[in-house]
Amino acid sequence: MRHSVFQKIILNYYALNGRDLPWRRTQDPYSIMVSEIMLQQTQVERVVVKYTTFLATFPTLSDLAHAALADVLIAWQGLGYNRRAKYLHQTAQVVEKKYGGTIPSSIAHLCDLPGIGYTTACAMMVYAWNNPCAFVETNIRTVFLHHFFSEKLEISDADILKIVTQTVYNENPREWYWALMDYGSMLKREKRVNNSSSKHFTKQSRFIGSNRQIRGAIITFLIKNKKIRFENLHTIFHEDKIRIENIAQKLIKEGLIVLEKRHLLLPKKNI
């Protein structure tokens, strides 16, 4: 397919069906960083609900940097993958200390921040600074598999990235990626592409009964009840004693909870 034709298809779709999402109404790097970390592994609909309230609680990067991690985890509830909240909190602290509160506008510096990899860094470059950075994420992968690799298997992201780079709409990269994201969302919703043709396709593991579910349950319990005696974990959550204690120990090691006088609590330390 000619690249100009492809661009026209994507942009025409966006002109008629583009989504009005709250993080698309700002070019503030902090707000965009919050949205991008929230959107990692979480559906747009769930992020829309939390994004506005999170920014109302922590309206500036400095507010987030100086908050207690416990308060950040409370504001994060409902999004899952609580490590992202901790990374976002740490990133705010690093930016406050190292960059004087101004989020850096280079891929290399962004990738040095906790919880920000190349894809998130590129997305921030595009959405905050309208920089034509080429990257691949799930919706973008869906679009390019559909239009450029529909009859091939074992397609790598490196193969896709070459075409993404060649087809970036340089006149307005920000709008171009919004259009790609919305078009990819439509393709997935209508099941018009087989993502299993990608080398990077994986089915999400079952949530019910998983370690991820138990991790979230422990943190939710601490938000509601403030503390829990370590030895009582298995009776409260009705889980194998060794398994749930190992999960708790990992949460402690990651800094998401703390153990004080045999009680588990949310961390209160800030910057």
Image: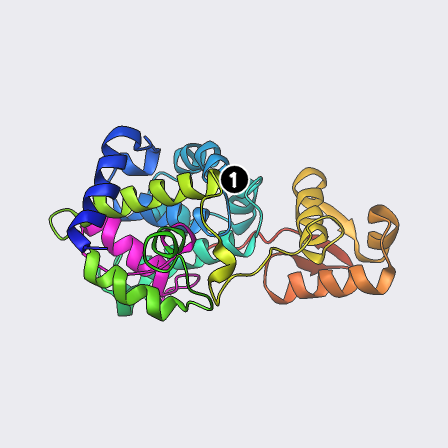
Could you tell me residue 145's position as x and y percent?
38, 56
Residue 73 visible in image: yes
Could you tell me residue 63's position as x and y percent?
38, 44
- In this rendering, position of residue 116 left or right of residue 135: right
Which residue is rendered at x = 71% and y = 65% of the image? 249
Q: Which residues are magenta?
A: 113-140
Circle 1 packing at 10 Å, graded few (<14), some (14-19), many (20+), is: some
Which residue is rendered at x = 84% and y = 46% of the image? 236
Q: Quadrant of residue 221?
A: top right
Name the amino acid, label 1.
Ala
Q: Is residue 160 magenta?
A: no
145 or 137: nearer the viewer: 145
Q: Residue furthest left?
A: 171
95 or 87: nearer the viewer: 87
Which residue is rendered at x = 33% and y = 53% of the image? 147
The quadrant of the rendering that contains the N terminus is bottom left
Q: Quadrant of residue 254?
A: bottom right
Which residue is rendered at x = 15% and y = 46% of the image? 172
The quadrant of the rendering that contains the C terminus is bottom left
Residue bearing the label numbered 1: 75
